[in-house]
Image (tube, grey):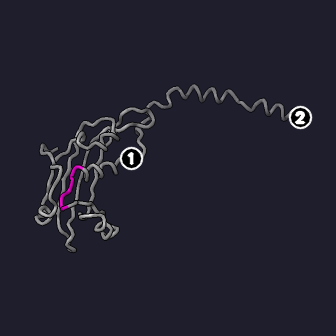
Amino acid sequence: MSDQCLPSTVVTQQLASRNAELSGTIAVSKLPRLAAALTSSEGEASVQLRFAIDDQGRRRVAAEVSCDVQILCQRCLQPMPLAIDSKVEAVLVAHDEAAQQVPRELDPIIAEEGILNTYQFIEDELLLCLPFTSFHEYNCGINAGSGEQSQQSETHKPFADLADIMNKS
């Protein structure tokens, strides 16, 4: 990862007109909504941003984000690693009304007064990449001891007496 910390805000018009690229890192601890969804706020996200102006004159940003985080396994309630790698391309707009004019196949990002909050943009993307449910890929112990229970359920047949009663009548 890069030693350079990504700036928290950037002026998009200047960067887009120069086809500029920025790369650096953001500490997970500086992304409070993401940190709240994780078991640890340690680590950092590696980010590469590319700014440009497209053929229609729209300012665009392409982002590549990778981050290794710890989330909660919903089976055993223990931390588990998750590698996030994401690519997103968006159109930078000034306000909600301009965002509604962006074609559906493109994602609008609001950069009020031409200033993009890079931390919020990256945090939103990382949050969207988190899985809805998270489980270890291996048996993480939730079924420990279930072998004894399955043997008991095979030997104990709760409706066996009902069958005897039905046969007698």
151 lies left or right of 107: right
Q: Please name the amino acid that badge 1 sits on.
A: Pro
Residue shown at 43% from the left, 37% from the top: 74
Residue shown at 25% from the left, 53% from the top: 121
Displayed quadrant of residue 115:
bottom left
Choose mark 1 or mark 2, whichever is in front. 1
Determine if the magenta segment contains residue 5. Answer: no
Residue shown at 89% from the left, 34% from the top: 169
Q: Please name the amino acid that badge 2 sits on.
A: Ser
- Looking at the image, which is closer to me, 6 or 45? 6
**Name of the residue lying farthest toward the right:** 169
Question: Closer to the N terminus: mark 1 or mark 2?
Answer: 1
Q: How far apart are the alpha carbons under marks 1 and 2?
A: 56 Å
Displayed quadrant of residue 26:
top left
Q: Which residues are magenta?
A: 113-119
70 lies left or right of 47: right
Q: Secondary structure at mark 2?
A: loop
149 versus 74 height, above or below:
above
Q: Secondary structure at mark 1?
A: loop
Label 1: how many Cα within 10 Å (few below 14, some 14–19, many 20+): few
Label 2: how many Cα within 10 Å (few below 14, some 14–19, many 20+): few
Q: Are marks 1 and 2 in contact (CB under 8 Å)?
A: no
Q: Which mark is residue 169?
A: 2
Could you say where residue 1 lies in the image, as x and y percent from the top left?
17, 44
Q: Which residue is mark 1?
A: 131
Q: Give the number of callouts.
A: 2
- Looking at the image, which is closer to me, 137 or 60? 60
35 lies left or right of 169: left
